Amino acid sequence: MARPTLSEIEIWLIGKGLCLASGVTPPPFKVFLKGCSAPVPQPLVLKGEQGRVWLDKYYVACDPGDGRVRYHYITRFHINETLEDIKEARLAGRTGQTLSEETRRAFISALRRMRATGRAYALFLSDSLPKN
């Protein structure tokens, strides 16, 4: 059976590399681990001069300063949770919560990779690293 996520150290190492490539100070592993261990895990949102990085138990993403979010690690759980949040917002009559076309394509690509590998997560490690 496939692991539902990468280990915390694997996720942190991906995030650390992305932070360093994006000019963002990476968090200490213990800080990330504390967030993963919370009853409701919350993403760390790290900002730097060249962009922003999201580091979470269920996804790692960055915006290198152009307003576009690029996923580098994403789980089926994160995709389902995001889609459910949007559905609930629409049912409650809240507008404004939508999925961008770029994010929709990233989710579709991730789900295809998950099906192809039999894993509950997908990696996009070199697809969209910031160019220095």
Image: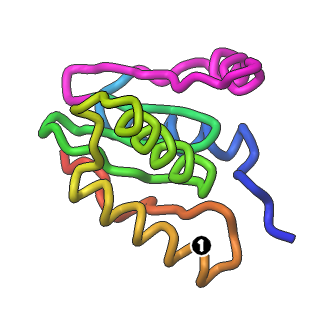
Residue drawn where x is 47% and y is 67% of the image: 110
| Residue 41, magenta (yes or no) | yes
In the image: residue 68, left or right of residue 122: left
Q: Quadrant of the N terminus?
A: bottom right
Q: Nearer the viewer, residue 65 or 106?
A: 106
Q: Is residue 130 above or below residue 121?
A: above
Residue 61 lies in quadrant: top left
Q: Is residue 2 above or below residue 86?
A: below
Region rendered in magenta: 25-51
Q: How many marks?
A: 1
In the image: residue 119, left or right of residue 51: right
Mark 1 residue element? helix
Q: Nearer the viewer, residue 79 or 14?
A: 79
Residue drawn where x is 64% and y is 37% of the image: 57
Q: Which amino acid, by three-letter code, is at mark 1?
A: Met
Q: Quadrant of the C terminus?
A: top left
Residue of label 1:
114
Residue drawn where x is 67% and y is 46% of the image: 10
How far across and how far down the image is residue 65, in percent? 16, 34
How far across and how far down the image is residue 107, in percent? 41, 61
The residue sitting at the bottom extreme is 116
